[in-house]
């Protein structure tokens, strides 16, 4: 089974030990980065090392990484190798030794094992196989290869290396950087010996490391195995996406052997081709790939084909099926509010839609033909004009909206979104009791527009309902199982209220 290893970079031996002792049992081992204790070895180094080895409560990797390999150690090489040999004598289960130093280190006493490591902080070199062979030839008990991913496509040769060798030679292969995160989370699927995690946010030893709590509690790392199905969100940027939190919680709730990852993608076609053979079963698609993904599908839902944009990919028996759950989820949120306001049916109502971007497009297609009047208003009037022509609606500039008396007001502009929380896209005087006001912005939880609307006696709907609705529909598309909507909403609310 692939182990979870937390890297410790505390500044004193006591802090190293207390951090180690505070870790839950699912953390199988720790890497003690002695180069974070000492840039050159002090007199007390041996005694401190002895204390760490005698008081460890789980297997340790002892590492003294030199500057040239991305560490902090600047002292003589002889001192470093001597201390590593001493760690072996003191019963450290593993010592980490760089590929270019392993010959100098020589033999070490059993049962300590050598993790022979190779790092490349510039790129993913083309000859990963050759590096692996060299490390194996140097007598490595465990081989570690850590290379920078500049693009998610760089993770593919790293995962392939793991798949080829993981079951025969204990191998750690990791793509560093945000783009490389899938290699850390999927270590168990591809048979890696271990995956490194950080103690907490900002305590990482390499770019892209995930805090251990997140890796286990959100991604359920220890349950991921060769059969685990892959899902994820394709976006750029992707770091702040809430989709991994809600979909992984939903998979856990219904007991599916599946994991949902953030994929930072620049080329959606190459990404699909590369990841599809690895049990990729479904994707959420978001900015900026919703349009570019559509032509890459084998089949498109009727609505998705009409809009030319998808937010959901389901892969079944090798075929890609693209659909759009944004539109029905927006309509459901809107109709729920209209029902509460007594405004159903919408066939005789006037709807003012603010914005002309992707969100506005989804809503406009959903509403077209279903409402009495649809007016699209946007800062850049030409974009409003184009969207209005596509869905046969009216359009105007923002300066004209206070003359309108809509029954339903929908905001899809980013006005009011964090951090500009003290702004509203409309004057408060436009808000009348009995109106429905729907704000697609959900960060903050209550925008200024929604607050003013509530004060004016409007019925409100928030972007949260939309977000959870589209995610729940995706989950149902992929799994055929009813989505745990309340749980999904709770996860989103918790994350947003944490800020
Ligand atoms: P999305 O896909 O989320 O809809 P988008 O395509 O970037 O995102 O669209 C953002 C919308 O917010 C656009 O309608 C944009 O107006 P422009 O088309 O004129 O750019 C609107 N928007 C952004 N900032 C705005 C501001 N300060 N005032 C008014 N509208 C704004």
Image (tube, rainbow, N blue to C red):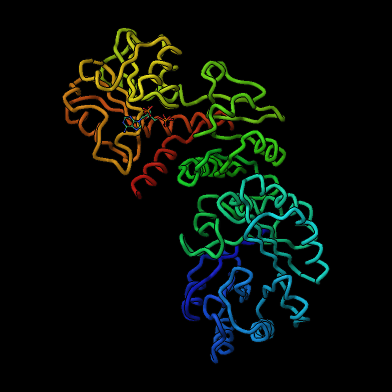
Q: Quadrant of ligand 1?
A: top left
In percent of width and height, residue 268 lies at 61, 35
- Viewed as shown, does residue 164 lie left or right of 17? right
Q: Quadrant of the N terminus?
A: bottom right
In percent of width and height, residue 170 lies at 75, 63
- Viewed as shown, does residue 495 lie left or right of 76? left
Q: Residue furthest bottom?
A: 43
In percent of width and height, residue 69 lies at 63, 69
In percent of width and height, residue 386 lies at 43, 16
Q: Quadrant of residue 403?
A: top left
Q: Work out whether 497 lies above or below 439.
A: below
Residue drawn at x 70%, y 64% as measured from the top left: 144
- Viewed as shown, does residue 408 lie left or right of 485? left
Q: Quadrant of residue 99?
A: bottom right
Residue drawn at x 53%, y 31% as measured from the top left: 474
Residue drawn at x 47%, y 80% as measured from the top left: 12
Between 168 and 145, the residue placed more toward the observer is: 145
Q: Work out whether 442 lies above or below 202.
A: above
């Amino acid at each position: 089974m692939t182990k979870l290893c937390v890297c410790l970079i505390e500044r004193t031996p006591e802090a190293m030990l207390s951090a180690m002792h505070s870790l839950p049992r699912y953390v199988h081992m720790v890497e003690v980065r002695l180069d974070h204790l000492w840039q050159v070895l002090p007199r007390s180094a041996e005694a401190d090392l002895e204390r760490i080895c005698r008081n460890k409560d789980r297997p340790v990797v002892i590492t003294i990484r030199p500057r040239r390999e991305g560490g902090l150690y600047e002292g003589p090489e002889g001192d470093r190798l001597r201390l590593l040999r001493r760690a072996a004598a003191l019963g450290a289960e593993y010592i980490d030794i760089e590929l270019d130093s392993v010959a100098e280190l020589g033999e070490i006493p059993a049962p300590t094992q050598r993790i022979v490591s190779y790092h490349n902080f510039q790129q993913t070199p083309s000859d990963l196989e050759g590096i692996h062979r060299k490390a194996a030839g140097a007598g490595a008990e465990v081989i570690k290869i850590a290379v920078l991913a500049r693009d998610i496509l760089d993770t593919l040769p790293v995962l392939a290396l793991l798949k080829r060798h993981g079951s025969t030679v204990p191998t750690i292969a990791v793509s560093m950087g945000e783009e490389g995160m899938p290699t850390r989370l999927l270590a168990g699927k591809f048979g890696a010996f271990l995956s490194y995690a950080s103690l907490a946010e900002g305590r990482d030893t390499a770019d892209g490391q995930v805090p251990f709590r997140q890796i286990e509690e959100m991604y359920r790392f220890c349950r991921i195995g060769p059969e685990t199905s892959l899902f994820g969100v394709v976006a750029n940027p992707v770091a702040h996406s809430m989709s991994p939190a809600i979909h992984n919680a939903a998979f856990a709730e219904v007991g599916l052997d599946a994991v949902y990852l953030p994929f930072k993608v620049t080329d959606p076609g190459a990404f699909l081709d590369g990841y599809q053979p690895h049990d990729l079963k479904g994707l959420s698609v978001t900015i900026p790939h919703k349009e570019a993904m559509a032509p890459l599908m084998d089949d498109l839902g009727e609505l998705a084909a009409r809009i030319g944009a998808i937010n959901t990919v389901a892969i079944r028996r090798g075929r890609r099926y693209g659909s759009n759950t944004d539109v029905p989820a927006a309509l459901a949120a809107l109709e729920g509010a209209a029902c509460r306001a007594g405004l159903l049916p919408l066939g005789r109502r006037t709807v003012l839609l603010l914005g002309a971007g992707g969100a506005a497009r989804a809503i406009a297609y959903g509403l077209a033909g279903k409402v009495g009047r649809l007016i699209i208003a946007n800062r850049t009037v030409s974009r409003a004009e184009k969207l209005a022509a596509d869905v046969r609606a009216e359009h105007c500039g923002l300066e004209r909206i206070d003359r309108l008396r809509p029954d339903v007001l929908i905001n899809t502009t980013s006005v009011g979104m964090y951090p500009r929380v003290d702004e509203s896209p409309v004057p408060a005087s436009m808000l009348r009791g009995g109106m429905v006001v729907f704000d697609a912005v959900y960060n903050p939880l209550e925008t200024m527009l929604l607050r003013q609307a509530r004060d004016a006696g409007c019925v409100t709907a928030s972007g949260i309902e939309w977000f959870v609705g589209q995610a729940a529909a995706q989950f149902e598309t992929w799994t055929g199982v009813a989505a745990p909507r309340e749980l999904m909403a709770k996860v989103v609310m918790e994350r947003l209220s944490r800020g």
